[in-house]
Structures are given as structure tokens and as C-alpha cells.
């Protein structure tokens, strides 16, 4: 029994170390948590950061367990974010519709369900829906020094419509 307990403890400590999570000797292992769908209210994307109708559905906040937040963002046709950067980067998983993404100084790219976009730390970019189709993505955004985004100027119609 002692051997089994020791092996279990080593496995728990190894898993925590692999995940980069803190573990205090003698502390109880954390328990799984479930946040029920609909427990967190949707919000409208603020007009100072978005053009058009955008809905943000928070999925999880950054916390001590993971230093990245998750959110489902739905852009109605033609809607888009302003130019922005992320100090710790961001991944976008396109879940429905057709979207557009652009890195500063590069051409607009089309994204579809299943596509994953990596926005490296500090890279200026925007994302949104195609002109005739809504788009939803899961945004997983890293946090550094308590900050996850730096907002910049609006994306002009000319920038949005560029090929």
C-alpha cells in the first residue's frame, strides 16, 4: 500500500510539473470543475474595438491554473475587430462560417471551420467575418503581466476589402 501511495504521489507531482502548475506538498490535488453553458452572460463587442455586430461569449478566464482565457466570438457579416496585438499571443479556432484575418503589411486571408490561426506575441493583426457570411471562432488568448490585448486603430473599409 505504501508503494502504491508513493507511486501515485510521484505521478501527480510529475503531471503537475509537466503542466507547469504549482503543487504544495501535502496539499489536496485540485478537482475538476465544470462551468455550465449559459452561466456566463454574452456581451456585445464594444464599438471602440469592433466594427459591426460582434457577440462575445466567455468560456473561461485566465487564472492560476492556465494563463490563457477562452471565448467564443461571433462576427456578423462584415463585422471585424480593430487592429490589435497580444502580449502573449492568441490562437483562433474557426468553428463556423467564413472569416478574414490579416497581419499588418500582409494580404487578407480567408479562414473556414477547422482552420487554426496563430497570432504571435506583438504581431499587429485583425480578424472578422467575410462580407456575406457570419463567422465564429474560439479565441484562446495568453495573458502576460495581467494584459491580454493592446487595441489600436479601426480597420478601414479599404483594408477590409483588400485582396
Image (cartoon, grey):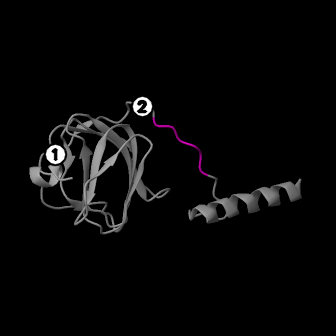
SS at badge 1: loop
Residue density around tag 1, few if under 14, some if 14–19, many if 20 or more, within 10 Å: some
Q: Position of residue 41 (x, y in %)?
A: 30, 34
User: Magenta residues, as a range?
Assistant: 30-35
Residue 27: assigned label: none
Vertical order, 98 against 92 (above or below): above
- Image quadrant assignment for residue 75: top left
Instruction: Give the number of marks.
Output: 2
Residue position marked by numbered label 1 in the rendering: 46
Left or right of residue 52: residue 143: right
Vertical order, 147 against 70 (above or below): below
Left or right of residue 111: residue 36: right
Residue position marked by numbered label 2 in the rendering: 37
Q: CA distance from mark 2 to mark 1?
A: 23 Å
Q: Position of residue 93 (x, y in %)?
A: 41, 47
The residue under the point 30% across, 69% down is 122
Q: Nearer the viewer, residue 2 or 93?
A: 93
Q: Position of residue 144 (x, y in %)?
A: 36, 67
Amino acid at each position: 500500500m505504501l508503494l502504491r501511495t508513493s507511486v501515485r504521489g510521484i505521478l501527480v507531482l510529475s503531471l503537475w510539473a509537466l503542466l507547469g502548475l504549482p503543487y504544495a506538498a501535502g496539499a489536496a490535488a485540485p478537482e475538476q470543475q465544470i462551468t455550465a453553458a449559459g452561466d456566463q452572460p454574452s456581451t456585445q463587442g464594444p464599438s471602440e474595438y469592433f466594427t459591426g455586430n460582434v457577440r462575445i461569449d466567455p468560456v473561461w478566464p485566465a487564472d492560476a491554473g492556465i494563463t490563457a482565457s477562452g471565448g467564443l466570438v461571433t462576427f456578423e457579416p462584415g463585422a471585424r475587430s480593430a487592429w490589435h496585438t497580444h502580449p502573449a499571443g492568441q490562437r483562433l479556432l474557426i468553428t463556423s462560417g467564413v472569416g478574414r484575418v490579416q497581419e499588418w503589411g500582409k494580404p487578407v486571408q480567408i479562414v473556414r471551420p477547422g482552420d487554426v490561426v496563430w497570432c504571435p506575441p506583438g504581431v499587429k493583426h485583425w480578424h472578422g467575418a467575410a462580407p456575406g457570411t457570419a463567422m465564429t471562432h474560439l479565441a484562446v488568448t495568453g495573458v502576460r503581466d495581467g494584459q491580454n490585448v493592446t487595441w489600436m486603430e479601426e480597420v478601414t473599409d479599404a483594408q477590409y476589402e483588400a485582396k
